[in-house]
């Protein structure tokens, strides 16, 4: 490295991974209750999945976001692939993905590598997500579309679920690029109730995200839409029920609700651990409001059991149509 050249960030060091959080006061991390403790990943299936990800030089949200279900999912060959790099231009206070200015342009070969990994894993259903790339004019919409097309070409029987950014700084028509590539499920998470956005999701706007999902349905009424929130951030029950109402007004098909888990002392604090009974109550309320599919448990995450849930979602629509 030339004298005076900046050293690359080491994303394993918390202060370099989240430089914007360095000055935040530490928030105590409470002990997790028994119902959300999970076993460390040690299975051969986990190791095999990890090797495929490494061999194809792919990033997964499972690792980057510190998902508690990584051991279970990877042991079954399921991984949520994260495209467009590993550094996010947003700085949400709940999220463990590295933040800052991405050091690289989009990798034109990445869609092909993702498609190769999907084929090697033999996936019936795949989830593709990404970091936010506010530094790119279309927010990565065309990159999403290319990835969907590459998977379709390599694994035509695999159903595809995408979990996208909000494209808030882009022209409205960029969403059309993604919808025209025809993923089976279009997911974009609202993450929390609107009153907590300034603290939890400061770079986003609640009603923009809601409108994004509504526009997907307007562009393609047959496409399944999905969104999720975390609880335990400081919301109350009435606010969660109102989010459900807002989602149904936007014709969202599938709702996920899971417990927020604090990645480090510098992240947003855990307000409380929501009990399994409360999650069951949320599930019952959501079905009562007309969602086709609901997953509401402490360990629920956007892509947890996504393949099985997609099959149930499709069956629910067929049943509704008679």
Image: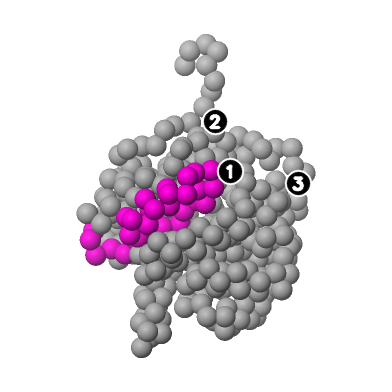
Q: Which residue is mark 1?
A: 90
The residue positioned 46% from the left and 37% from the top of the image is 136
For the record, the magenta segment spans 155-183
- Outermost residue to the top: 3
Q: Which residue is mark 3?
A: 26
Q: Quadrant of residue 316?
A: bottom left
The residue positioned 31% from the left and 64% from the top of the image is 159
- Mark linked to residue 9: 2
Q: Choose mark 3 or mark 1, whichever is in front.
A: 1
Q: Can residue 293 be seen in this snapshot?
A: yes
* Between discs 2 and 1, the one toward the N terminus: 2
The residue positioned 68% from the left and 55% from the top of the image is 197
Mark 2 to mark 1 CA distance (whole Å): 17 Å
Question: Tag 1: Cα neighbours inside 10 Å, few (<14), some, or many (≥20)?
Answer: many
The residue positioned 52% from the left and 11% from the top of the image is 3
Is residue 59 depicted above or below 322 in this figure?
above
């Amino acid at each position: 490295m030339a004298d005076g050249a900046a050293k690359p960030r080491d994303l394993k060091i918390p202060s370099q991974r989240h430089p914007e959080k360095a000055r935040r006061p530490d928030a105590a991390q409470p002990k997790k209750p028994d119902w959300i403790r999970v076993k460390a990943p040690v299975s051969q299936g986990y190791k095999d999945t990890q090797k495929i990800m490494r061999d194809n030089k792919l990033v997964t949200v499972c690792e980057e976001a510190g998902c508690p279900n990584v051991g279970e999912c990877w042991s079954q060959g399921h991984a949520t692939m994260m495209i467009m790099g590993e550094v996010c231009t947003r700085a949400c206070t709940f999220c463990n993905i590295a933040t800052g200015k991405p050091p690289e342009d989009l990798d034109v070969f990445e869609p092909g590598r993702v498609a190769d990994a999907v084929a090697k894993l033999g996936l019936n259903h795949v989830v593709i997500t990404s970091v936010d790339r506010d530094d790119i004019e279309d927010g990565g919409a065309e990159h999403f579309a290319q990835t969907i097309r590459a998977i379709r070409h390599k694994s035509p029987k695999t159903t595809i679920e995408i979990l996208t950014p909000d494209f808030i700084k882009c022209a409205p028509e960029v969403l059309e690029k993604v919808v025209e590539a025809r993923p089976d499920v279009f997911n974009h998470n609202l993450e929390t109730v609107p009153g907590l956005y300034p603290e939890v999701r400061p770079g986003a706007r609640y009603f923009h995200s809601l409108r994004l999902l509504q526009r997907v349905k307007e562009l393609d009424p047959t496409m399944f839409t999905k969104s999720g929130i975390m609880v335990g951030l400081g919301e109350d029950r009435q606010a969660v029920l109102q989010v459900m109402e807002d989602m149904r007004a936007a014709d969202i098909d599938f709702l996920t609700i899971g417990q927020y888990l604090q990645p480090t002392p510098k992240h947003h604090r855990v307000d409380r651990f929501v009990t399994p009974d409360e999650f069951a109550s949320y599930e019952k309320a959501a079905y009562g409001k007309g969602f086709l599919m609901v997953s509401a448990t402490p360990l629920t995450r956007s892509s947890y059991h996504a393949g099985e849930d997609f099959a149930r979602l499709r069956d629910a629509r067929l049943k509704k149509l008679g």
